[in-house]
């Protein structure tokens, strides 16, 4: 029984994508960092589209190598054969979007890690464990990678594993252009053609553009090139025809290109063609390896490619399975995928690979309350920074006491007084949230003077944006409009930056709040097409929990869930709220603050307890809440 659908052998790199559209690379002001490399992109795309994929390559023993590995693992790619090369660096690519025809591209791949892949990096059993082996063209371009690729093919042919080749012709990577000319897609070369033709007899599936078919077939006439390929192999040939779609040739080559049976592509507004071929291959394999018809597979491929050309980036632009199917059903009314809210929400949530099953959050993003406490006892505000660092120690101690996986630990920390605390956990796997609201503002205002988009753009992508809004359905229309516009602004800033959003909603005390209040608030925001990744809500009664569960599941079944807040209640009161909330699967834990830290912080500010006593006191409170939540959750899951 083969446990893997596809092993992808070849390039794995990091793309630095210029963020300014309509610019040459020298005038770019900033770059986004994405997973890159054709084989890595395809492994990533196949996994997002529901296949069991594995990557066979090397990366450097450095930050970029870890990034490649993490990105692949984030969508479920098997990285057991992503080898860390201690002698070489991970390949890099710098690229941009100058206009609809010009995409400057520079490869930094001299002696890079993935080109050092060796026969020693895999076994026959590993290749045999997969239904297919995909190799991209660059890994036939050097003597060593050719030998390694041919050994993998040898193992595949002996193990009933299909061999798939994406020609992926980059003349610069074959030494045919100047080093800086990564953009050129075709340079004729008899040597390259003859070299590629030694591989073709072993292939079960060959995929390429017209230029790539030309180089493989040794002719710039498409039919002549196809005839030469057919002389050498009986494989299926998929010829990509750009925006027209593709044609799939299973046996005799047509006499003329006019005789191609073209499976038409989806017409979209083009932003960026880079990476479209990797998405095309991922889509095709999604059908092909599941035994679906070649026409259906081609439709998946065309649609996947169409989505990528409308977006920034290569791997991150590839659709997820649900997104692809939605697009195929609705493509006729979506000429520009980048503007369709439903489609882009499905794309956004498709990045959620390994989810936090539950979050046990310690919230100490409090600025106003701690400043007031310091003022009350005549303490220098610099001590607020210190106490937040001590709270990190309390959190670590709670982990040790309760033996909880670090992925379940959450913290909410501000950067006003908590910057050092935030920096100290940069390499931890904790769930991290950061506030953006001006404390106690109503109508909502954001902290700081810069735009909210600029503010969060400087944050690490694993930091969740948290916003507290005091909101009530009975607010005046003017107040509601002001607050809703701020939340919309923040939500779309998060869509642009890629950060997750936690929306915390607290109804003001001056209003009467019944069991319908929170459900009405959530429904209002969903009606505004605002779909936060997380909600943070106060304790509720069963009727409210039932309503809220239904509203979230109806409007956004991909929501991460609700985190329960504490509102400075006593520990006993908060634990009582757990007894209700834990019954509902939509509640995924808590983020509680003053309940945990306020009393010990007050004693510490008065110097009635020392640093170690504070750490122990806070750790105990936090641990007690974690254990209480686990107890109730276990009861209701039985």
Image: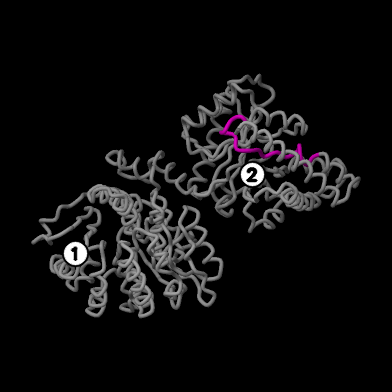
Q: Which residues are magenta?
A: 583-598
Residue drawn 15% across and 52% down?
A: 261
Q: Quadrant of the N terminus?
A: bottom left
Residue drawn 27% across and 72% down?
A: 199
Q: Nearer the viewer, residue 444 or 55?
A: 55
Q: Nearer the viewer, residue 370 or 14?
A: 14
Q: Nearer the viewer, residue 335 or 278?
A: 278
Neighbour tally class for label 2: few under 14, some 14-19, many 20 plus, Cα within 10 Å = many
Neighbour tally class for label 1: few under 14, some 14-19, many 20 plus, Cα within 10 Å = some
Q: CA distance from mark 1 to mark 2?
A: 60 Å
Residue that mark 2 sits on: 435
Q: Quadrant of the C terminus?
A: top right
- Secondary structure state at the residue bearing disc 1: loop
Q: Nearer the viewer, residue 353 or 306?
A: 353
Residue drawn 71% across and 36% down?
A: 628
**Relative height, residue 236 to residue 148 (above, below):** above
- Secondary structure state at the residue bearing disc 2: strand
Q: Magenta stretch containing residue 585, yes or no? A: yes
Lower position in the chain sequence, tag 1 or tag 2: 1
Residue that mark 1 sits on: 234
Q: Is residue 169 left or right of residue 592?
A: left
Image spot of residue 210 (x, y percent): 21, 64
Q: Is residue 573 left or right of residue 99?
A: right
Identify the image quadrant of residue 360. Answer: top right
Q: Is residue 226 left or right of residue 569?
A: left
Identify the image quadrant of residue 465. Answer: top right
């Amino acid at each position: 029984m083969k446990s893997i659908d596809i092993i992808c052998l070849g390039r794995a790199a990091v793309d630095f994508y210029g963020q300014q559209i309509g610019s040459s690379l020298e005038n770019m002001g900033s770059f986004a960092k994405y997973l890159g490399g054709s084989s890595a992109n395809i492994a990533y795309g196949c996994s997002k589209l529901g296949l069991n994929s594995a990557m066979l390559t090397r990366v450097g023993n450095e930050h970029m190598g870890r990034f490649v590995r993490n990105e692949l693992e984030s969508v479920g790619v098997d990285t057991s054969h992503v080898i860390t090369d201690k002698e070489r660096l991970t390949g890099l690519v710098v690229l941009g979007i100058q206009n609809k025809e010009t995409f400057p591209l520079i490869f930094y791949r001299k002696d890079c890690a993935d080109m050092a892949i060796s026969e020693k990096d895999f076994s026959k059993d590993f290749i045999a464990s997969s239904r297919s082996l995909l190799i991209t063209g660059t890994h036939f371009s050097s003597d060593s990678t050719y030998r390694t690729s041919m050994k993998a093919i040898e193992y595949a042919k002996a193990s009933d594993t299909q061999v798939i080749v994406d020609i992926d012709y980059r003349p610069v990577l074959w030494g045919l252009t100047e080093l800086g000319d990564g953009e050129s897609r075709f340079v004729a070369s008899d040597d390259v053609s003859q070299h590629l033709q030694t591989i073709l007899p072993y292939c079960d599936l060959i995929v390429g553009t017209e230029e790539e078919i030309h180089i493989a077939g040794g002719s710039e006439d498409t039919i002549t090139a196809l005839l030469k390929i057919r002389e050498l192999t009986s494989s299926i040939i998929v010829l990509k025809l750009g925006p027209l779609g593709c044609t799939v040739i299973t046996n005799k080559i047509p006499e003329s290109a006019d005789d191609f049976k073209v499976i038409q592509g989806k017409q979209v507004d083009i932003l960026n063609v880079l990476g479209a071929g990797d998405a095309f291959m991922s889509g095709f394999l999604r059908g092909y390896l599941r035994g679906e018809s070649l026409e259906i597979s081609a439709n998946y491929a065309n649609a996947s490619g169409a989505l990528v050309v409308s977006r920034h980036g290569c791997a991150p632009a590839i659709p997820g399975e649900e997104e692809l199917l939605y697009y195929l059903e609705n493509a006729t009314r979506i000429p520009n995928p980048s503007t369709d809210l439903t489609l882009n929400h499905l794309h956004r949530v498709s990045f959620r690979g390994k989810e936090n099953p539950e979050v046990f959050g310690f919230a100490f993003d409090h600025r106003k309350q701690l400043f007031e406490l310091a003022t009350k006892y005549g303490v220098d505000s610099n001590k607020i920074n210190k106490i937040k660092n001590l709270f990190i120690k309390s959190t670590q101690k709670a982990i040790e006491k309760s033996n909880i996986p670090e992925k379940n630990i959450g913290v909410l920390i501000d950067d006003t007084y908590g910057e050092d605390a935030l920096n100290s956990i940069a390499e931890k796997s904790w769930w991290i949230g950061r506030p953006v609201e001006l404390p106690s503002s109503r109508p909502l205002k954001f902290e700081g003077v810069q735009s909210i988009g600029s503010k969060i753009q400087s944050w690490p992508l694993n930091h969740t944006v948290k916003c507290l809004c005091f909101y009530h359905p009975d607010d005046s229309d003017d107040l509601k409009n002001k607050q809703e516009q701020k939340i919309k602004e923040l939500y779309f800033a998060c869509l642009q930056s890629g950060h997750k959003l936690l929306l915390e909603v607290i109804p003001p005390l001056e209003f009467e709040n019944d069991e319908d209040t929170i459900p009405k608030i959530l429904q209002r925001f969903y009606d505004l097409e605002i779909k936060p990744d997380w909600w943070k809500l106060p304790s509720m009664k069963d009727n409210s929990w039932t309503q809220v569960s239904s509203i979230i599941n109806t409007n956004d079944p991909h929501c991460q869930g609700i985190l329960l807040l504490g509102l400075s209640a006593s520990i006993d009161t908060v634990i009582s709220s757990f007894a209700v909330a834990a019954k509902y699967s939509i509640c995924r834990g808590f983020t509680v603050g003053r309940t945990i830290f306020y009393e010990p912080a007050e004693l510490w500010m008065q110097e009635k307890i020392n640093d170690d006593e504070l750490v122990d006191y806070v750790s105990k409170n936090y641990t007690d809440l974690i254990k209480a939540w686990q107890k109730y959750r276990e009861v209701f899951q039985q």
